[in-house]
Amino acid sequence: ADLGKPRKVNSETLYIFSLQQEGYERVNLLGSKVRSDIEELHDKIAACIIRNKRIEMLYEEITTLSTPRKRQRLQAKEAASEDGEKGTELIEKYVEDTIKNGDDNNKKLIELLFESDLKVIVSGISSIVTSDDQDEKIRPFLKLFMSQNKIFEVLEYSLYHTIALTATAQTMFRRKSFATKLLQLHMEDEGMDYLRKTVLNLVNDVTSYSHSLEIDPKKIRKGENTKHNLEKLFSIAQKFLDSVLSSGNLLPIVFRRSIRFAAET
């Protein structure tokens, strides 16, 4: 509307512009006696419309880009579920044959694990193992896979299975699984020396620190200062961060490979 020409409305002289939503017949008229007020309102509404249009265009672009990715995730989920079912059937058959024949033959177990499709077998194990299973049940798998030099393949297959069946990134690795348990045990074995070299001295410094590090005003003791304690905590945290970030050459290969695989998957 032409804001330069005031109009008479019910004996009042008003500056007016119209606002109509796309696809609707109804027209809204906005007016004011003061030209500057209606100009300011007009500009704000126009800016809001432009911004919403940009958001709508951006949303359409993101939707277009995400559609193939959603399809890929769905296909990966279906494939992981199928591999899990196949692997479970193979493992269950091995157990049934073992019980039926009374034959606890390690050779047959080795054949099952390493002469079958390893990805399918690992998916089957991942489907069978629950979050309640104790680490003692997982450690023999770790030793066996390491003895056959298959630990990296097994870790990657188990991580892939877990990631493929996870609905959202926010819930990734929230529950314990065969992948997280196996990775945790392996990292405990491989990473202890790394932890000693990077953070042991810092941990000892913190535990031997005599001054309180309390920052809750309700729990602070008389004579202590929350601001000082917070600064001290920031300093300690920075030392830990600096130590970890500067220790790339010490980081065990299992850390690097597993984290990179999870990120890329």
Image (cartoon, rainbow, N blue to C red):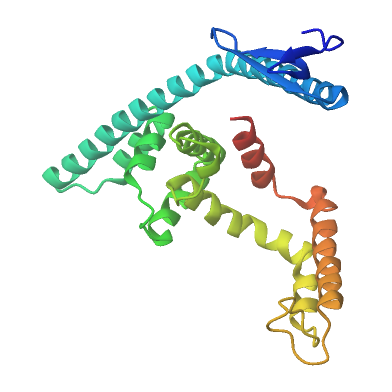
Give the residue at x 43% y 34%. Answer: 165
Give the side of residue 209 with respect to residue 154, left or right.
right
Q: Nearer the viewer, residue 186 or 160?
A: 160
Q: Position of residue 133 (x, y in %)?
A: 36, 57
- From this view, report whether residue 50 is shown above or below residue 136: above
Q: Nearer the viewer, residue 251 or 207?
A: 207
Q: Position of residue 124 (x, y in %)?
A: 34, 37
Residue closest to the far front: 11
Give the side of residue 207 with respect to residue 138, left or right.
right
Where the N terminus falls, by quadrant? Answer: top right
Q: Position of residue 76 (x, y in %)?
A: 46, 24
- From this view, report whether residue 100 is shown above or below residue 46: below
| Residue 147 seen by the camera | no
Give the residue at x 35% y 29%. Answer: 81
Give the residue at x 33% y 35%. Answer: 112
Give the residue at x 15% y 48%. Answer: 102
| Residue 252 seen by the camera | yes
- From this view, report whether residue 133 is shown above or below residue 248: below
